[in-house]
Image (cartoon, rainbow, N blue to C red):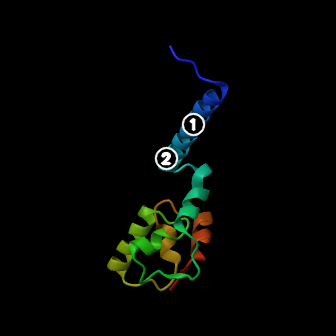
Amino acid sequence: MFYLTPQEKCVVVSLCVIIFCGTLVNIGLQKNLRLFNWLHSAQKGSLTTAININRASVDDLLRVPGIGPKTAEYIIVYRHTHGPFTDFDPLRGARGMSPQRYERIIKYLKI
């Protein structure tokens, strides 16, 4: 049997807490919980100029806070099927697009 000093116990407990918290954050990001939306937007980086919706690639669209893989795919498919966007109204028909989300992403896009 071995015994740990109080300092060693503190280090072991601290490491366990850090691992546990990291696991919770990872699960939250994978499940796309609203609590972790700020992490998604921080990972995407800030946009200094609006993205042209008619020229943007999937990677460009994914940089916009509020646009995920499904919405980016919708935009690309819509462009190939119907031609270039003339206005942003077709985005309202994207799966999972709420009025609040629409208003949030529209400021990062241009035609």
Residue 69 as seen in the image, left or right of residue 10: left
Q: Which mark is residue 110?
A: none
**Mark 1 sits on what residue?**
15
- Write down the quadrant of residue 85 in the picture: bottom left
Camera-side mark, 1 or 2: 1
Q: Amino acid at mark 1?
A: Leu
7 shown above or below 61: above
Question: SS for tag 1?
Answer: helix
- Write down the quadrant of residue 76 in the picture: bottom left
- Residue positioned 50% across, 46% down in the render: 26
Q: Are marks 1 and 2 in contact (CB under 8 Å)?
A: no
| Image coords of residue 105 (percent x, y) | 57, 71
Q: Amino acid at mark 2?
A: Lys
Q: Which mark is residue 31?
A: 2
Question: SS for tag 2?
Answer: loop
Camera-side residue of 35 and 4: 4
- Residue positioned 49% across, 72% down in the render: 91
| Image coords of residue 59 (percent x, y) | 41, 71
